[in-house]
Image (cartoon, rainbow, N blue to C red):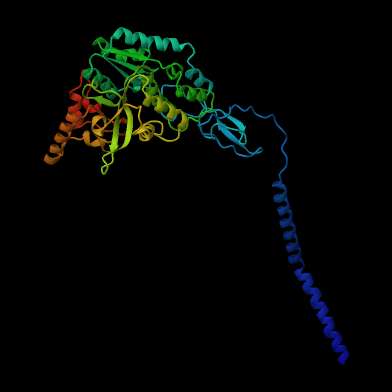
Amino acid sequence: MFQATKLHHRFQNIISSVFGFVVLLPTSLFALFFLVLLACNGFSVFYNNLSVPAKSSPEPANLLPENPTGYKTVTKLASSVIYAVKEENPPAILKTHLPLLQKLKFSMVPVGKPLVFRPKQARLSRQILRTLRSGTKAEGFSSKVKDFFQSSKCKSRFFMTWISSVESLGDRELLTIDSVFKSHPKACLVIVSNSLDSKRGGVVLKPFLDKGFKLIAVDPDFDYVFKKTYAELWFNRLKKGNVDPGEVSLGQNLSNLLRLALLYKYGGIYIDIDIIVLKSFNNLRNVIGAQSINLETKNWSRLNNAVLIFDKQHPLLYKFIQEFALTFDGNKWGHNGPYLVSRVVARLTGRPGFNYTVLPPSAFYPVDWSRIQSIFRGPRNEIHSNWLHNKLEQICRQSYAVHLWNKQSRKFRIQEGSIIQHIISDPCIFCNSSKSSL
């Protein structure tokens, strides 16, 4: 009896085990299937990331010569498999009449190859090269300027550059030209501009010629102007595609270099086209102006290149041009302009062989760019009216010119009784335009 009961219990345990196995079988199979899927997926990921040798392709030509000493080199990215999209001709950043940039064209270029530019930066196109190469322009530019100076019997030589369109030349820019001849009636003015050296440009400038003023607009010939200077070396590298023009307008940086080269070749006075001349520069020679001073030391803290007055082949101009060519950076605003002249003069201070004068901010920059709105505002009350009156007297007494800082002030309108209203009323030769629209 006892043995029968024991057998019965064992039989019951076997039945329970079989029943449990049957019940749990689907769950076990599902888990096993899930593990198999995970294993397959892991193998697939591992396989896809294996380094598989790519098919060999023709090596693209290396267009870069060895970098000359003193020039920045471009770091090479070590990869023969990864490719990047290079922009052949990205859209223009700022308005310029130099046809610097065209529509986008893309090509696949190995990142590991020695590229001059990073993927999203500009590269000179054939059209740009045609514009920058002088071709037959050298004789035309040099003869035009030479004949102009010889026939005009200039008492002083002024230079300006204009890189935008004829339509962009507004009342403010014409006022600058106006102020030059008001204070220097016997001066010669050369505006280096390919847009103004045209029929439409001639119409814009004709009123000054009709008044008997000596003025010429001439298309730039960089090869001729830069010849036998460090600018020539830099420009040749630019044309070959070995200089990164950067994100700052190439036209703006060419203007920074062009003003230095023009003065080095011809000597004279360069002014930006947003400078209002108040009095004669005839007693100034080999001069650059400070934009700001250190209030504690009373020494200049920054210079500016909006007004430059130098003799032909002055050694300081040579150093400026050299600095431009050897330290060019197209991605930093001011690096090749105001900051450049500040760097060079700081290094040369106290060294013999350089004859120049640094004038205080009151000479050309009596109002800093950050406060330029103050001279466009009319009097708000008696105290403000007195301040405006005293500031105007100070400018008239101490300043040769006023920089309007067009980039910051263009949006401002001239209010009645403002400092700028009084200033522009005095040098005005042609007073037909509305002053409030300047």
Write down the quadrant of residue 95 in the picture.
Answer: top left
Task: Residue 39: give x, y in percent of width and height.
Answer: 73, 56
Q: Nearer the viewer, residue 18 or 226?
A: 226
Q: Nearer the viewer, residue 340 or 135?
A: 340
Quadrant where the C terminus is found in the figure: top left
Write down the quadrant of residue 187 in the picture.
Answer: top left
> In the image, is 130 to the left or to the right of 385?
right
Is residue 376 among what the camera can see? no
> In the image, is 191 to the left or to the right of 398?
right
Task: Residue 396: give x, y in percent of width and height.
Answer: 17, 29
Task: Residue 337: give x, y in percent of width and height.
Answer: 38, 31
Is residue 276 among what the camera can see? yes
- Residue lying furthest bottom: 1
Quadrant where the N terminus is found in the figure: bottom right
Residue 344 versus residue 133 in the image, above or below: below
Give the number of marks: 0
> In the image, is 101 to the left or to the right of 275?
right
Write down the quadrant of residue 348 in the picture.
Answer: top left
Task: Residue 420: give x, y in percent of width and height.
Answer: 21, 30
